[in-house]
Structures are given as structure tokens and as C-alpha cells.
Amino acid sequence: MANETYDLLIRGGKVVDGTGNPWFYGDVAIAGDKVAKVANAGAIDPASASEVVDATGHVVCPGFIDIQSHSIIPLFADGKLLSKATQGVTTEIMGEMWTPAPFGGRIDNPMRSSVISADIGHWEEQAREWTSFRDWLEAIEARGTSLNIGSFVGGGTVREYAKGWDMGEPTEAELDTMRQVMHEVMRDGAFGVAPALIYPPSSYSGTDELVEVAKVAGEYGGVYITHVRNESEQLVEGIEEAIEIGRRSGCAIEIYHLKASGQPAWPLMEKAIAAIEQARAEGIDVTSDMYPYVASGTGLTVLVPNWAAEGGKLFDNLADDATWQTIRTEMLNPPPNSTAMARA
């Protein structure tokens, strides 16, 4: 149509449309909050747009979706999330292991599971009012954010709500509490549940418990997205556990950052991929994602034995000389199921 008008025209950039097609030099026209037209460079009249951006030398593409965002704390400090927006991220999906909501049950501090390096001011106290998952999401929305946001519920949060930081299998009553929490968060808009099985208290969860939690997520069309229990010499076993949870629960499975951590584990990647492909051939909905770089990182506590954090007493145990020596001995001589980083 000759009379088409646009609010914004992005001209002359390398257009990568996300479909897998080769990039091309093109123009992208925006009307309202929608992409109205994509055409070869120079095909759209600049006079048709209220604003024109010269994208020469730049890539023009759909916004990136960070499906494993750790922006929960940064959102408290900066609703604009400039550190992500300037990298082209437009959607943040949070929730691995921990979320500050729902607060209640046996959780005594909604922020304890996080590594807080920023001054979050009144948010720490306000988090005690987020007794539902929706409370937290609405607080972020009310504060304002430049990006789209969504979240899984932290698997460790579900576990802690019912059982605190105690190790061992849950009682039937505790398992019922986990199921009830899952029903509530799914109705509140959670995308599913996200355990990270190398970090307490999430690492205290057994396979049977995770199956029951995943069943509820699956009832709502949600996803069980997981940092598997081992990413080094027992990588294949970690993948197989995730697949078993999908098989038994009927829930879709996503494996966070598929990798073989540590050189001794590198040959296992072929077997890990084969296990995923076989599961998919059986009809199990399992997928995975990967880092776009050859690196990884985590906190120092991943090197500490799981038992040392039981009861939330990690720092007390580290301060006790005798217990610290036991912890130190195990850190220097970690068992076979420890992370590759622990043995490096």
C-alpha cells in the first residue's frame, strides 16, 4: 500500500530473522508495538516513518530470550536491566534453584539462598510479604522493568518450603506440601519448576520426590527444567535421571547448559546426546540448551560437601574447627560423584 506509515524504520542493517535463513541487508518497519514490514535495504521510504534509525554496520534481529537468567537480584537494583538490554536480551526467564517467592512454610529467610552482592534496600523486608508467587511477579511489574520477564519456581524453594534445609526423603505430609505449593505457583503463572541438583537444599531432593513435583507442573503444561545432578564423570547418569523424571511424570524436560565438565568427562558427551535422542524417539519431551562459549562458573560453595549445609548451618560448621577440618578433608579428597571443579 502506497500510504503505509510507520512509527519507526530501522534501515540498512544485517537482518537476522531467527528462522535459520541467511542474513541479508534489510529494512525493518515498526508500527505500534509490532513489526509491520521487513524488506530489502532501501525498499521502504524513510519518509513513511516518524523516526528513522540508521543500522549500517549493525545486526538487526529479534530480541534474545535468556532462559536461564539470574537477574532476580539485579532487578531489585535496576528495573531497566541495562546490562542485559544492551546485549540484545529482551526476555528474562528466571528461577533456577531459587526464587524469593513463595515465602512461608519452613523458609525463614526468603533471600538466604541467593548470593546478594548488591544493596537491595527495602526489598529484603518486602520479600517476606510475598507469600504467593504472584506477589513477587506483581511487585516487579509495579516497580517497572524494560524487559519481558517470567520465571520458574526454584526447585530448592519448593523443597525448603516443605522441609527446610533437612536432608533425607520427605514425609508424605511434606510431599503433599510440595504438591500444594506447585499447584499454587503454577496457577500464579510459573513456567514450571527448576531444581539445581548440585546446590543445597535442591541437591537433597531424590528422584521420587522430583517426579511428584514434576507431575504437578505437567498438569498445567509446565516444564521441569534442571541443572542435572552431575555434569562430569557421572554426566550420563545425571541425564538419565532427568529423562526418568520425564518418563514417570509425563512432564516436559529441559536440561540446563548441557556440558561435560572437566577433561575426563569430555568423551561422555556423545553418550549424553545419544541418551537424549533415544528418549525423544520414545516420545519423551526432552530438550537441552548450551552455553555459547567454552566456559562455566559457579560459587565456591559448590566445592563444599552437601552435608555441611544441612539445617542451614553451613557458616556455623565452617566456624567450628573440628567440623571445618572434616569439610576440608572431603574438599581435598572429594568422592567420585563430586563436580569436576571439586577435583580440579
Image (cartoon, grey):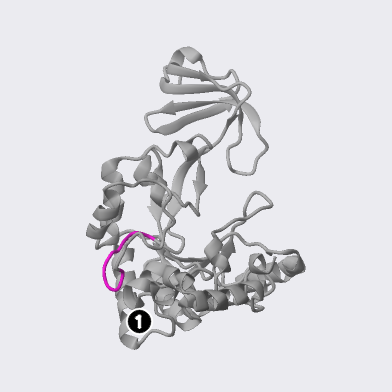
Q: Confirm whether the magenta stretch covers residue 103.
A: yes
Relative image position of residue 94 (x, y in whole percent): 43, 54
* Residue 9 visible in the snapshot: yes
Where is residue 19, by image quadrant? top right
For the point 35% across and 78% down, the residue is 163
Residue 335 is left or right of residue 146, and the answer is: right
Instruction: Please determine whether, in this image, residue 19 is positioned above or below residue 198.
Output: above
- The kind of residue tagged 1 is Leu
How many dots with numbers? Answer: 1
Residue 67 is left or right of residue 142, and the answer is: right
Q: Confirm whether the magenta stretch covers residue 198.
A: no
Where is residue 156, by image quadrant? bottom left
Residue 130 is left or right of residue 159, and the answer is: left
The magenta region covers: 99-107
* Residue 255 visible in the snapshot: no
**Which residue is tagged 1?**
175
Q: The C terminus appears in which quarter of the rendering?
A: bottom right
Instruction: Please determine whether, in this image, residue 293 is positioned above or below residue 109.
Output: above
* Label 1 packing within 10 angstroms: few (<14), some (14-19), many (20+): many
For the point 56% across and 69% down, the residue is 228
**Foreground pick, 331 / 118:** 331
Q: The N terminus appears in which quarter of the rendering?
A: top left
Instruction: Please determine whether, in this image, residue 261 is positioned above or below residue 68.
Output: below
Relative image position of residue 255 (x, y in whole percent): 56, 64
Relative image position of residue 128 (x, y in whole percent): 25, 59
Instruction: Please determine whether, in this image, residue 200 is positioned above or below residue 1.
Output: below
Relative image position of residue 72 (x, y in whole percent): 40, 51
SS assignment at label 1 = helix
Residue 342 is left or right of residue 140, and the answer is: right
